[in-house]
Amino acid sequence: MLNVSLVSFYHRLEEYPSRYSLAAFRLAAHNLAIPDVRIRILPVHMDESPEVTTKRLNDLSTDLTGMTAYIWTTDKVQTIANSELLANPRIVIGGPEVSALDICSFPSGTQLVSGEGEDPLRRIILSILTGQEGDATTHKDVVFPSKYTPIYSEPFMPALTEFEDTDKTFTWHDTSVGCAYNCGFCGHRIRQGVQARNLAITEEEIKGIGRIGFNERAIIDPILAFPLGRDKKILEWYTQYAPDTKVTAYYRSEVFNEDTINLLASTNMQEVIIGLQTLNPCVPSWLRSNDLTKAYNFLPQLSQNGIPFKLELIIGLPGDDYAGQRSSLQEVIDVFKPNSLRAYPLTVIKNTKLAAIVNADATGQQEWVHMDQRSRAIASNSYSQTELNRMVIFASALTSLYNVLKPFENVTFSTLERRVLDELGKQDPDTMHMFRRANDKEGRSYWKNELK
């Protein structure tokens, strides 16, 4: 029997109360049916010591350890992989930061998988079983088989080590991978097109969600409505099989019509998340092509029909500036009236169109962006670093104040702006630094204290 342990790193449970990652779910589900293989998912808190983690892996008689490298897990992945306490040093590592890893800093035989890992993991497992181990990381986008183990099904649940009642608070789901749109800043488009999961298996997964009794579920499809109309069947299944599970899902205003509004109004929808990003027409269409007619037509209908929704904006898209960002915020607050509002500083994701214009001013290109060591944008052809700092502080202060006041009163942009500018005008260094971090939780806590 080959024992495969997939490490699921977690933290920030107050924001996302789940110890099990969807990536680990999908890797396990794709490969659980291989004969003579036992796959288990091991939840590991980021504060857990490497010594404790390696002991837990050894207690599972682990023959192959799978870990995911994100910016926030890379150091921990490397420490665990190189631990002399690990009984079997056979390691496979995937995730978005794999391209930045130095294979020489890992034990001999460690395999790095870039992109979707389901098929490469299968090839690695089969190569071990047949005694023909080698580099199995060459891959294409995974094509979902018609038959694989549905996550949350009874055959799947033994893969979750240490599953407890507290783990029923929140979990993740997806019904497709990839995005039909081609926004230049977005990592979803690294995969070509949309690959939908098997509908029959998706139905079984939703049945499992209802059977287990999860309180909340976030569907992380980039846009739930693709392929077009598919969301109707999926949300109907949630209503039928998991009526007590609150659902969060992502949409774009471009896919809305009257049927969509009626559908969302009839489901147990906790929150519809819409990445609007900007209303500034100076942002190039290759970065973010918005159908503003659709936005102005359908987004107000969400509020009018009692559909809770969050709008997300991005701070620092090339082409935007302080005046353009201010105009976007004003329209969003006074016209669309979302239940909550977030503004995120722009991150430059590898292999995107945006990444292709990093430092492009050095070659005389008109559109360019500079970024720091964390891949955060710091300047572009339309704003300086000083102006971006002003944009981040203003947007963070304004949106967090909006989120505090919106549940209790009909707030307007002008009222919010006056309060924000008065507060920022004090130039308190700690306050300015706090808003510059663009942490909505910190911002809301600050305003709640100020408004007492």
Image (cartoon, grey):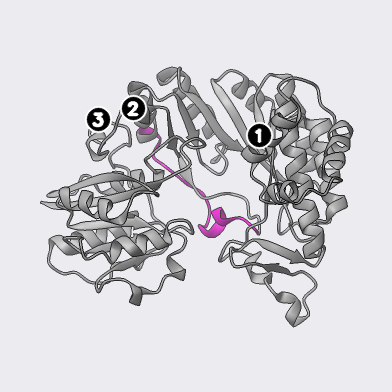
Question: Front-most of 368 and 237?
Answer: 368
Type of residue at label 1? Ser
Going from the N terminus, do you reach mark 2 or mark 1 first? 2
Q: Is disc 3 in contact with disc 2, using a CB cutoff of under 8 Å?
A: yes
Going from the N terminus, do you reach mark 3 or mark 2 first? 3
Q: What whole-number distance in Å separates the C-alpha atoms at marks 1 and 3?
A: 41 Å
Task: Determine the residue positioned at 71% across, 64% down.
Answer: 378
Q: Quick one: label 1, few (<14), some, or many (20+) residues within 10 Å?
A: few
Report the side of 321 relative to 6 (left or right).
right
Q: Examine the structure image and report whether residue 193 is included in the region drawn in magenta.
A: yes
Q: Which residue is mark 1?
A: 445
Q: Examine the structure image and report whether residue 436 is included in the region drawn in magenta.
A: no
Task: Determine the residue positioned at 70% across, 69% down.
Answer: 370
Question: Front-most of 136 and 314?
Answer: 314
Q: Quick one: label 2, few (<14), some, or many (20+) residues within 10 Å?
A: many
Going from the N terminus, do you reach mark 1 or mark 3 first? 3
Q: Which mark is residue 208?
A: 2
Quarter that holds the C terminus: top right
Type of residue at label 2? Gly
Q: Which residues are magenta?
A: 185-200
Which type of secondary structure does the marked residue at label 1 adopt?
A: helix
Q: What whole-number distance in Å separates the C-alpha atoms at marks 3 and 2?
A: 8 Å
* Residue lying furthest bottom: 363
* Number of marks: 3
Task: Determine the residue positioned at 26% across, 63% down.
Answer: 91
Relative height, residue 90 to residue 52 (above, below): below
Q: Which residue is mark 3?
A: 154
Type of residue at label 3? Glu
Which type of secondary structure does the marked residue at label 3 adopt?
A: loop
Question: Front-most of 124 and 170?
Answer: 170
Q: What whole-number distance in Å separates the C-alpha atoms at marks 2 and 1?
A: 37 Å
